[in-house]
Image (cartoon, grey):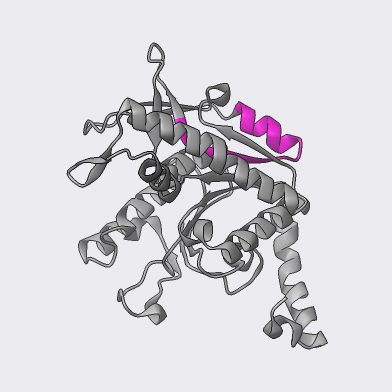
Amino acid sequence: MNKEVENLSADQWSQVLVEALPYFKNWVGKIVVVKYGGNAMLNEELKHAVMEDIVLLNTIGIKVVLVHGGGPEINKMLDKVGKESKFVDGLRYTDSETMEIVQMVLTGKLNKDIVGMLLQQGGKAVGLSGVDSGLLRAKKTEKDLGYVGEVTEVHPEILTSLLDEGFIPVVSTVALGEQGDDARYNINADTAAAKIAAALHAEKFVQLTNVAGILRKVDDPSSLIKRIERTAIGSLKATGIISGGMIPKIECCEIALNGGVPRTHIIDGRVPHSLLIEMFSDRGIGTMVY
């Protein structure tokens, strides 16, 4: 516990708890899909905080699905085995040998590391990939990047079963090919998480990122836009407020919204316990797209 928290008075503590209680009641039994990535996946303190948050949500009866990628871990393993990367228009080309390494890292080491951290925090976690129970089906992306795919089907029954039994499913984004295609595909984790959220009829879809949210001025954190209605996305793109790396994040929000998820969020994973701040406080954090 940090000193700021230790120095809270009894009145301040009671105010925090009173403010959080209605949110606790509101979220019990609801499904929340969290895309885990960015600094929150690399920094040990932030890793610890995210795992604590997820276990707390699960403990009070919120059904959490944690979806993860693992680009940095994949890069480290490719370097370790001396595999040179090939790029097409700035995007990594994944040949069959690279795909073997991707599958090994994502569905093996990284997935089980996350499950282990959740178990150490007292959570009930189960690791699986998009291959398990045919959860994700995919086809090659329109631009030929080898074994990089886009999700065409989500079969969430395995997730529903695990959630109903009180488990936290931890999903790595390797997918099966479509019927008749026995290949494995590496899937963008943000997109996969959005499609999983839609298939589960989740109440909330959260992307943990390395930015504060959507800013009116890129270098000014005080210009954070806290709430965006879906109909305003087009004009924000046209004026350049939503641009660059934020475009795919917003597109994932749109995928989830179009699939019936009422609330989507882009929040700053660099802030410890940002997930709890978003879920259980009046102030919230980051940008909500609804």
* Residue 201 appears in the figure: no
Q: Tell me the residue at 77%/80% (across/down).
A: 13
Q: Quadrant of the N terminus?
A: bottom right
Q: Tell me the residue at 39%/11% (across/down).
A: 180
For the residue pair 45 and 193, the one nearer the viewer reads as 45
Residue found farthest to the right: 10
Residue found farthest to the left: 89
Quick check: 289 left or right of 169?
A: left
User: Where does the image place residue 68, in percent across and percent down from the top left?
Assistant: 51, 45
Query: In the rendered image, which quarter is residue 282 located in?
Result: bottom right
User: Where does the image place residue 154, in percent across and percent down from the top left?
Assistant: 49, 29
Query: In the rendered image, which quarter is residue 113 located in?
Result: top right
Q: Which region shows up in magenta?
A: 157-174
For the residue pair 203 and 79, the one nearer the viewer reads as 79
* Residue 160 appears in the figure: yes
Residue found farthest to the top: 180
For the residue pair 78 and 128, the one nearer the viewer reads as 78
The answer to if 158 sits in the magenta stretch is yes
The answer to if 213 sits in the magenta stretch is no
Q: Tell me the residue at 35%/28% (across/down).
A: 97
Picture mark count = 0
Q: Tell me the residue at 73%/47% (across/down).
A: 119
User: Where does the image place residue 218, in percent across and percent down from the top left?
Assistant: 30, 74
Q: Is residue 165 above or below residue 266?
A: above
Q: Is residue 36 above or below residue 189?
A: below
